[in-house]
Image (cartoon, rainbow, N blue to C red):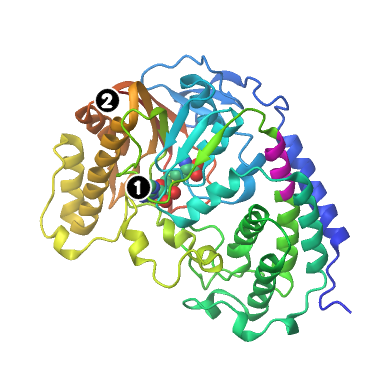
Amino acid sequence: MAYYNISLTEIKKNVQRRAKKYRETNFFEDDFSIGIVKEVENDFGEKLTRVDGNIPISLPIEYGQRFLFISYDQTRVSHGLHKYPAKFFPELPRWLIQKYTKPDQVILDPFTGSGTSNVESMLLGRHSVGIDVDPFAKFLTKVKTTILDIEELGRSTDYILNALVKYDPSKINITELPEFPYRDNWFNKEILYELTFIKKLIKNSPFSNSIKDFLHICLSSIIRSVSNADNNCTRTVVRKKLKKNIYPSLALTKFAETLLLNSYRMTDFSSSIKQSSSVEIPDDSDARNIKYPRGYFDFALTSPPYANAVDYPRTHQLEMYWLELVNGSLAQLKKEHVGTESVSAKDYKSLHETGIYLADKTIKSIYKKDPRRAFIAYKYLVDMELNLKEVYRVLKKRGKYVIVVGNNKIRGNNFESWKYLMEISERVGFKVKEYFGSEIINHFIKVPRDERINTDWIIVLEK
Ligand SMILES: C[S@@+](CC[C@H](N)C(=O)[O-])C[C@H]1O[C@@H](n2cnc3c(N)ncnc32)[C@H](O)[C@@H]1O
């Protein structure tokens, strides 16, 4: 007698429906068909160029022009395996890679996050390197760029689904539950047992490490939704007002659904890679210290963090505990992040200047209200200058570095990162070839209202 009455038929039917929708939303069946371009006006009467789907390689661009890109591929292939804050929409790196590189060339993303540019590089037959300091980002990128044996993937999916319906909590000993800070506040008891069961099932399953890593990412992708924390906040927080409907068996059914959908995505991905390509995710690099030789890369692209906007270690704190990527404190990890809020009081006793007029004006204005945040903003620009110097060094002569960056509000001041970064880039030796805006209409995860980022600016630099 099964402990819960989980119907695999129901789950499969549900997933079939979602998979059908997934097929339909990717209405550009032919992978690299050209999207539709037309002129539109936004709610404020401003002119925008709207591009639906794939961006034409030869799309004409004027200085400062603003685009509205509509993406259809955010959950396509391995892009859809897991949420990640401020992800690229895949059509953007796809377009930039096609525009600026040839097959077999080597591409760098120094703040690679969930590896969108690495996945697209693979689909286009390019080699790429993805650098990130975040252990979760590196693990996710690895899984998203690992081609799976489709036959083994099918077998492992069936194996796991059949084991899930036979769930029996009495087979889990309390000592097997993972230990991490405030565990019992984050998760209900039944959910803790279910998640531990899934973890054990993966560990003891007879499959390759690539399959096990993929299964761990499926597990990770349900963690937030079965926890007591808000699903839609970049910080992991439990909100008293939020009435989440968490009930026994939820982790098991959600995992089954996610596994089925993600297997479908990975099959799609694994069978889509036709040209030779490779991805390196170095363990020892940082965007400010890139351990590759001078002139190694043909092209670089990235979306760096924003100053003082997303606390990445806190975003994936529960996922990292379950995947054993950190234990206990996140303090050290936070310090390595560009844009970090972890600064010490002695650093912001006095006002610091970058030498960039507009940036210093804003930093001074922030300083009047909040010296700590003024230092965070200053340090962000110092770190970004280190990154620009490093990318300049590792790029080939005339190689391009494309940076996609938004503005944000810091203590009521508009912190226009893109303008400051353009000036810093020139100080480092780059030439600014182009810049244009991309309106953002789709955020996976909400950020506080007054700090919402509305336009991303795309800056094209040349060495
Ligand atoms: C905006 S996200 C990149 C998202 C990515 N474009 C995607 O599609 O998923 C910025 C990333 O920079 C990473 N990061 C922060 N500080 C870093 C550093 N010093 N070196 C490398 N990566 C860093 C963060 O961990 C985060 O994953």
Secondary structure under tag 1 reads: loop
Is 270 part of what is drawn in magenta?
A: yes
Q: Which residues are magenta?
A: 263-271
Which image quarter is the C terminus in?
top left
Residue picked out by circle 2: 430
Please tell me whether the stretch drawn in magenta is mainly helix, strand or loop. helix
Residue 444 appears in view: no
Amino acid bearing label 1: Asp
The picture places residue 58, in percent across and down from the top left corner, at 51, 14
Q: Can you see residue 3?
A: yes
The amino acid pointed to by label 2 is Phe
User: What residue appears at the point 60 percent right and 64 percent down from the top-left corner?
Assistant: 223
Give coordinates of residue 99: x percent, y percent: 49, 20
Name which quarter of the figure residue 323 lies in: bottom right
Most foreground residue, 341 or 267: 267
Q: Residue at x 42, y 32 (%)?
A: 301
Q: Is residue 143 magenta?
A: no
Pointer 2: residues within 10 angstroms few (<14), some, or many (20+)? Answer: many
Q: What is the quadrant of the N terminus in the image?
A: bottom right
Disc with the residue nearer the chain's start (2 vs 1): 1
Give the foreground label among 2 and 1. Answer: 1
Identify the mark at residue 95; answer none if there is no mark.
Answer: none
- Judging by the rendered image, the residue that carries numbered circle 1 is 286
Disc 2 CB within 8 Å of nearest ligand 1 atom: no
**Residue at x 72% of width, y 36% of height:** 271
